[in-house]
Amino acid sequence: MRPLSLLLAAVLGSLPGVAGAPYGGVRAPRLLSQTGLYAAPGRLDPRNRAYSPQYPLWSDGAAKARWVRLPDGAAIEAGDEDAWTFPVGTKFWKEFQFHGRKVETRLLWHARPGVWIFASYAWNAAGTDATLVPEEGLPDAAEIAPGLRHTIPGVADCRTCHENGRTEVLGFTALQLSTDRDPGAIHGEPPRPGLLTLEDLVKEGRLRHARADLLARPPRIRAGDPETRALLGYFAANCGACHRMDHPLDGLDLDFRPTGRTPGEPGLASTVNRPSQYTLPGEAPGTTLRIRPGDPDHSAVYSRMASRRPLSQMPPLGSALADREALDRLRAWIARAPAR
């Protein structure tokens, strides 16, 4: 069977944003050092601002670093708090390290109006530079565990998640950058000096049409207890790009978007005691629940997060290892939930 990235690339390869392929005269640079991330070899350009989302995406335990560059004098259109619109020229980079070695760095570049370039770069063994990978991706880029290796995703894989909603940018939102950070966030990084925050963007005039009380009432996942807040944040980051009611998958009403402002988060309403189209082994069709309170072993969400079978694992892309910390916390949360 051909990898999903190759199948999608065959269909999407001629569409805007394909790394390495010219579109409107735009092409991803061949080397990472040519993208603007560095001012000199090994020295980051000071115009690139480091940031860290409070709810990070699980990527097989990779250590990540992230940077953004906004064009001088430009601002983000922030009227829609959940889907910011970024000015032309904006660039994002995300670096992945496994076992202390740089393996890949991804570039997301708003190159021209309506044109986003997606590109991934594989680091050389010396760690001096990284080279643009083919648009179908690069398998076996690094060992992440015995018998398992990291695959650098293809352009079609990137597009699957990043072009599934109202904005191409994930992980850089008012909620993710809020200084009202969730101390219980799964894999969350503690804030450290120098990281770009929502407060910085407001004070620097980088947000246009944001609500006036954005800092006084920052977006926050509304949940009845800290562990529910943390799990909803995890679902938002890892599932919300695809499972969302403003851009639903066919036949599904799963909604992991965090509203950040109102009680009754949709992540609970669309999962707890709700029937699943996926049938767990040994259960009759139509009887499996997405989350069955008190019974994690008969909850489809838990089962599919734990699986790494291609036809059942969730998320379907981006990881070869199940997230044990998230699974342990989800299992305990479901077990404590009162059965109905």
Image (cartoon, rainbow, N blue to C red):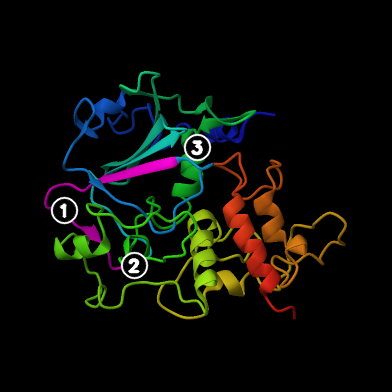
User: What is the count of numbered marks?
Assistant: 3
State the SS at label 3: helix
Along the polypeptide, which appears first: circle 2 or circle 1?
A: 1
SS type, badge 2 = loop
Q: What residue does disc 2 label?
A: 81
Residue 246 appears at what percent x and percent y? Answer: 49, 65
Quadrant of residue 328 within the rendered picture: bottom right
Q: Quadrant of residue 110?
A: top left
Q: Residue at x 48, y 63 (%)?
A: 233
Q: Which residues are the magenta region? A: 63-81
User: Looking at numbered disc 3 in the image, what kind of residue is underneath it?
Assistant: Ala
In the rendered image, which residue does mark 1 sit on?
Answer: 74
Whether 241 is drawn above or below 337: the answer is: above
Label at residue 156 = 3
Residue 283, image x, y percentages: 86, 60
Nearer the N terminus, badge 3 or badge 1?
1
Q: Is residue 109 left or right of residue 227?
A: left
Kindly identify the residue that appears in the image at 57 percent across and 41 percent down: 319
Q: Quadrant of the C terminus?
A: bottom right
Dot placed on the residue nearer the N-terminal end, 3 or 2: 2
Foreground: disc 3 or disc 2:
2
Point out the image quarter for the N terminus.
Answer: top right
State the separation of the CA atoms marked 3 and 2: 27 Å
Q: Kindly identify the amino acid type of the residue bearing the numbered disc 2.
A: Glu
**Residue 137, position as x, y percentages in the image:** 49, 28
Is residue 300 magenta-colored?
no
